[in-house]
Image: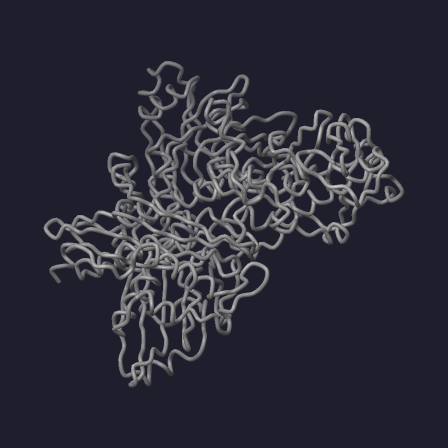
């Protein structure tokens, strides 16, 4: 989603950055440039409250620093990372820093948390704001101390000049701070040089761990509103086209606290055929919903199966007129015509669920004509207009109050679960808390679509690799939820969901390379395809890196050395500043380091193998370079695969928050393992077949392998880490199985029966 150029805190145009004493502290805020205010000082503007400033951070008279954060917190400690950027530039005492998650007031600009963008997009603007604050504090302190500002520096929330020191608290109490910067002036501040950093890239504690440990942290599911009632939705038989014909609530009337039901009519058309069941307790709402009988007319996809979706994908990738071009380098048709040797391979992934610990939920109340939504969400700016349309209000009359997310993983980029809560509150005239049960949550999930990929590689008569052709078909999340963000295909034939094909534009140098991105229209109308952690590369990488292994073996080359020969950083793969300095050379570096650490090439016992894969993060415009070596053991009798160890080296540039970086990468890699061997469902009768953990079984603790994760230490521009660790794990495992027992697996998840069948083939 890098094409969302303004999806960060910088927000609107024509603003000034104000730093001034205000109230009982110092406020540092962006403010719109208003006519008639040009002669007012920053202090006058901040204290007059004649406008709505975007307060990035503030310092009170005790020296406490509060950083306001627009990004959602879902376990990745984003607030800590962003606060650390500001604090380092200020020269602050980390023990006096805290942060706050803001609501959807328009002053905060575009709000989205996904794609591993948070640090990447916020690093420069938050560094500049912190640097401007540092300058203002130094100037005020210099005046109080009677020294030159150029002789001062900040450290541990003090301005220091020789033997003299002045605490930020004293400066706030005694100093006169009143500065205005234009956006151009602010842009001249550069982040500190690495040697001058005190907090960034240094070990630290996450600020939100204490409240999460004690239970004080408030997640969406914890919200309590005065006078609220509870609701549970009844999920219709199809995502689209279902109609409620009759509701029989005679059985529900025996449930204590049952308050009735509402058949929801949704002008936003997100919900079709929904009933909301009401009670004075959550338990009552659950029991009453179980007792209600609803007669539906189901939509057209009521009989669709996983096999139907895969068959449609197979048909689409075989049709060379389907889809639009995502990559078209060289002339693959000419290469295919003159080739003397070729191989083909098809790779598939099953439907996959998010299964966040906290089921989706929302609490809604209407006060003074304003719809207040209390929930945890990742893309507030996308779904606030949807809620407004559903309840018939202007967007200025809807506020989403942000809470912690008990797991997001891309599911809460969609805010569809807010709509039934809002419609129910409007219908009843009462505050409503609507919570999905685990089964409801699964059936309403925006699943990772099943996918089919087809590859063909071509060689000359001299054995030179000429090129690779690649086609990929799946349901596209962006097509349903944010079609405006879909760019034109390279051939201008159609729009493509780049978030469902990123990773196919890899960093290997090929003379001829073509990629077709194809929407599986049957999947699109059966469910809402969703963004799941690592998004497109999470399944695209499975095909790309598995097939690259096939190509290496077809050439008789070592898979690691073969990859290195293609990572030459020539042409478009040379990289660019600031986010991709070094290009494919950095990918080659992490590959060399990972194979060295994993002991690549060493002799292993029978039925054990090492497999390698690389990845370049979410998208070429924000590469996080990584490699993974998986060490597996295969039981030839049962086909059972045991992952003994995962070794990975990551290069994300500057590692802003090392503890958070390690935690995110561990989680991402374990999810990659889960999707490789354990996790997957199927569409049956238009719905997911598995809706709870008795049948949908992610990775268990007993199956967690040894992990060796390290980060390249450099001072390059920081890129994302929330998702990249997932991408290379599954293909590394698949390639390791091939090296262990000679079985090439092409379907995810990899089941023991599939391994055994492949060994016997």
Residue 715 is left or right of residue 234, and the answer is right
Q: Position of residue 736 (x, y in %)?
A: 25, 57
Vertical placement of 93 versus 574: above or below? above
Residue 381 is left or right of residue 512, and the answer is right
Residue shown at 59% from the left, 41% from the top: 199
Q: Position of residue 251 (x, y in %)?
A: 31, 20
Residue shown at 42% from the left, 68% from the top: 567
Q: Quadrant of residue 558?
A: bottom left
Q: In the image shown, does 697 or 434 lie closer to the viewer?
A: 697
Residue placed furthest toward the right = 39
Residue 150 is left or right of residue 723, and the answer is right
Q: In the image shown, does 628 or 617 lie closer to the viewer?
A: 628
Q: Coloured how?
A: one colour
Residue placed furthest toward the front = 163
Q: In the image shown, does 495 or 677 lie closer to the viewer?
A: 677
Residue shown at 39% from the left, 48% from the top: 709
Q: Position of residue 145 (x, y in %)?
A: 83, 34
**Quadrant location, the C terminus:** bottom left
Vertical placement of 113 versus 512: above or below? above
Q: In the image shown, does 337 or 120 lie closer to the viewer?
A: 120
User: Does the image show residue 171?
Assistant: yes
Q: Position of residue 6 (x, y in %)?
A: 63, 52
Vertical placement of 582 versus 15: above or below? below
User: Does the image show residue 424?
Assistant: no
The tally of labels here is 0
Residue shown at 34% from the left, 44% from the top: 670
């Amino acid at each position: 989603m890098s094409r969302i150029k303004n999806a960060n805190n910088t927000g609107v145009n024509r603003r000034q950055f104000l730093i001034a004493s205000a109230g009982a502290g110092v406020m540092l805020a962006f403010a719109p440039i208003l006519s008639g205010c040009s002669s007012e000082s920053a202090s006058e503007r901040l204290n007059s409250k004649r406008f709505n400033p975007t307060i990035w951070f503030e310092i009170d008279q005790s020296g406490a620093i509060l950083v306001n954060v627009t990004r959602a917190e879902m376990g990745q400690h984003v607030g800590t990372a962003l606060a650390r950027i500001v604090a380092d530039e200020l020269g602050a005492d980390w023990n006096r820093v805290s942060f706050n998650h803001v609501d959807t007031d328009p002053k905060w600009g575009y709000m989205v948390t996904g794609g591993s963008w948070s640090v990447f997009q916020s690093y420069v603007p938050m560094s500049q704001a912190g640097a401007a604050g540092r300058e203002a504090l130094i100037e005020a302190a210099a005046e109080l101390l009677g020294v030159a500002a150029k002789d001062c520096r900040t450290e541990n929330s003090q301005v220091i000049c020789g033997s003299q020191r002045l605490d930020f608290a004293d400066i706030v109490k005694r100093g006169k701070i009143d500065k205005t910067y234009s956006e151009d002036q602010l842009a001249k501040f550069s982040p500190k040089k690495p040697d001058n950093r005190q907090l960034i890239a240094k070990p630290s504690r996450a600020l939100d761990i204490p409240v999460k440990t004690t239970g004080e942290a408030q997640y969406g599911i914890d919200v309590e509103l005065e006078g609220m009632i509870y609701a549970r939705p009844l999920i219709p038989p199809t995502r689209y086209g279902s109609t409620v014909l009759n509701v029989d609530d005679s059985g529900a009337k025996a449930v204590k606290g049952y308050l009735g039901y509402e058949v929801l009519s949704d002008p936003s058309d997100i919900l079709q055929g929904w009933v909301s069941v009401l009670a004075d307790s959550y338990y009552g709402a659950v029991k009453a919903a179980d007792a209600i009988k609803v007669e539906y007319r189901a939509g057209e996809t009521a009989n669709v199966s996983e096999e139907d979706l895969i068959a449609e994908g197979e048909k689409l990738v075989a049709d060379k007129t389907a889809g639009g071009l995502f990559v078209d380098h060289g002339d693959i048709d000419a290469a295919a015509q003159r080739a003397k040797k070729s191989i083909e391979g098809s790779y598939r992934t099953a439907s996959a669920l998010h299964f966040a610990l906290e089921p989706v939920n929302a609490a809604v109340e209407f006060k003074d004509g304003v719809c207040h939504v209390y929930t945890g969400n990742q893309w507030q700016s996308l779904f606030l207009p949807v809620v407004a349309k559903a309840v018939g209000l202007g967007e200025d009359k809807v506020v989403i109050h942000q809470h912690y997310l008990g797991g997001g993983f891309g599911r809460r980029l969609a805010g569809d679960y807010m709509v039934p809560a809002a419609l129910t509150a409007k219908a009843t005239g009462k505050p409503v808390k609507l919570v999905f049960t685990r089964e409801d949550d699964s059936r309403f999930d925006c699943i990772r679509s099943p996918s089919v990929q087809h590859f063909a590689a071509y060689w000359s008569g001299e054995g030179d690799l000429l090129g690779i052709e690649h086609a990929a078909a799946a349901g596209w999340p962006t097509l349903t939820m944010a079609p405006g963000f879909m760019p034109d295909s390279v051939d201008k034939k159609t729009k493509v969901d780049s978030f469902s094909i990123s990773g196919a534009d890899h960093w290997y140098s090929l003379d001829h390379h073509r990629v077709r991105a194809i929407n599986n229209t049957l999947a699109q109308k059966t469910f809402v395809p969703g963004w799941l952690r690592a998004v497109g590369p999470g399944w695209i990488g499975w095909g790309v890196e598995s097939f690259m292994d096939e190509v290496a073996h077809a050439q008789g080359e070592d898979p690691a050395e073969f990859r290195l020969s293609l990572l030459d950083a020539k042409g478009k793969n040379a990289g660019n500043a600031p986010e991709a300095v070094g290009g494919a050379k950095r990918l080659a570096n992490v590959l060399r380091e990972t194979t060295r650490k994993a002991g690549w090439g060493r002799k292993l016992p029978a039925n054990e193998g090492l497999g390698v894969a690389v990845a370049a993060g979410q998208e070429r415009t924000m590469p996080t370079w990584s490699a993974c070596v998986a060490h597996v053991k295969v039981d030839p009798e049962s086909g059972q695969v045991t992952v003994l160890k995962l070794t990975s080296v990551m290069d994300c540039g500057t590692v802003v928050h090392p503890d958070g970086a390690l935690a995110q990468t561990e989680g991402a890699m374990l999810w990659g393992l889960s999707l490789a061997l354990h996790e997957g469902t199927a569409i049956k009768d238009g719905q997911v077949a598995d809706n709870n953990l008795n049948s949908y079984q992610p990775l268990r603790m007993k199956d967690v392998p040894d992990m060796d994760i390290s980060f390249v230490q450099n001072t390059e521009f920081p890129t994302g880490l929330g998702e990249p660790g997932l991408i290379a794990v599954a293909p590394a495992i698949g390639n390791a199985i091939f090296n262990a027992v000679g079985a090439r697996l092409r379907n995810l998840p990899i089941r023991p029966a599939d391994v055994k069948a492949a060994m016997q083939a």
